[in-house]
Amino acid sequence: MSLEKQFKELLIQVKSLNGEHFNLKLIKDAWNFAKLAHTGQKRYSGEPYVIHALETAKILTSWRLDTTTIIAGILHDTVEDGAAEVEDIETSFGKEVAALVDGATKVSHIKLRSSVEEEFVENLRKMFLAMAKDLRVIFVKLADRLHNVRTLSYVPKDNQKRIAQETLEIYVPLADRLSMGNVKGELEDLAFVYLYPNDYKKVLKLSQLHYRKGDARIEKMKHTILKVLAQEKVVAKVVGRKKRLYSLWRKLERPDIEWDFSKVHDIVALRVIVNTVNDCYTALGIVHRHFKLVPKIGISDFIAQPKPNGYQSIHTKVFGPGGGVVEVQIRTNDMHEQAEHGIAAHWGLSALKSTGELDSKGIDEGKWIINKDKFSWVRQLAEWQKEISDSKEFLNAVKFDALSERIFVFSPKGDVFDLPINSTPLDFAATVHTDLLNMVKAAKADGKMVPLEYKLKSGQVVEVVKDKHPKPPSRDWLEFVVTTQARREIMKKLKKQGKI
Ligand code: MN
């Protein structure tokens, strides 16, 4: 297909979304600009380089982002790899686009005389800083990365592993925290192939039979559920979903599973998508009336209590026809949209605009989204990048705190706190209030006393038993706290005491 034909596809895609809000003329200008800047350049695949820019823009369009972001997608490599300067972009496309392209551009090699790891951290710092000013930078980076790993097979072998590793360590958790489930899943599966080729082949081979069996089972259930839902006048879509390979592998590797497929209950799941939250609970009742709930492991209500990244659905495990366990996931259309595309689709520009949370002045200033509480972690990342000069410490803060897997726990009053996995009551205390670290006498989880190094679990109610007299933190605490906030706070207090 000719280049121009492929570009036409982007225009068609843009128009089909919401024509009047998009500036097609400016998108065409960006295309011509990018072609010029990348003249003569080729990808490892042998294709003209500018195809990568186009594919990045197509991905951004599929996430329903605005003209500015789509244009930044087309231009994102014109400075780093092409012949353009940020100033040229600003002249032709304005400050916003220029800032996005600059944010997505790596620190130039000339400025860096450092190791590969330090260079990597410098680039992370730059990206997080840009992200805190305008979250759309991260959409451009994610779309760029997605196309890069989709075409990873053409890249020289030495680079494949490094790119796959970086994808799993940085971009997957970013997509997760932005609740972009689809992107997270695709990035994981693509990285899996290059990082753990043997495990990949093994899971691929062993899972086929189980996918087939699961499919047959849910096909039967689907008919029953659809019929009863129709009788109760609930409009619903019922679809099967296959567990992705990487996520299946991670589960199989768990010590409580040990590659026993019969213990993985969600290899295939049945998804019931309805219009309203009320319909969700009606559907749940119907499922439980017709299929027996599996005792103990049965039901999780992530509608009443969303996951830390905002994920909402009801998950229930029932005995399907013939006896095997089947997971049923019930959610509204909105929740589904949000789970698949996350913030890009749901809290996009138009949504914020229509709720009046944001005016065009705010958008011009790049303030959109970032002011919401949900994204305080983005601001936190930007602050750390200012405060933490040591690159190892910064990388740890990123990997083991900001971008680590999350748990959520409750205060005795019922407030929810979102913490990295393996957090202790001390991490909880530091998150609630830094001064609380001066009062810790003991801790309780779900009403029972636990040691201070206890690893909290999602859903627990955590209580700090306070000492009447403030006392400084103990040095030993540094051995087991996991949050950067707790670590830095303890260090600060110890230093004040002259203890370190
Ligand atoms: Mn790129």
Image (cartoon, grey):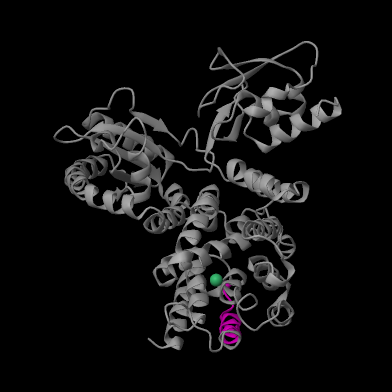
Q: Which residues are magenta?
A: 21-34
Q: Quadrant of residue 33?
A: bottom right
The spot of residue 394 in percent (x, y) is 68, 47
The spot of residue 307 in percent (x, y) is 50, 38
The image quadrant in which ligand 1 is located: bottom right
**Residue at left 75%, top 62%?**
365
The spot of residue 228 in percent (x, y) is 22, 39
Number of numbered discs overlaid on the protein picture: 0
Along the line of sight, which residue is nearer the eye, 78 or 366? 78
The spot of residue 356 in percent (x, y) is 66, 54
Along the line of sight, which residue is nearer the eye, 481 or 324? 481
Screen quadrant of the N terminus: bottom left
Q: Relative to residue 224, is residue 175 depicted above or below?
A: below
Along the line of sight, which residue is nearer the eye, 138 or 269? 138
**Residue at left 67%, top 65%?**
103
**Residue at left 37%, top 49%?**
246
Screen quadrant of the C terminus: top right
Q: Say whether residue 143 is visible.
A: yes
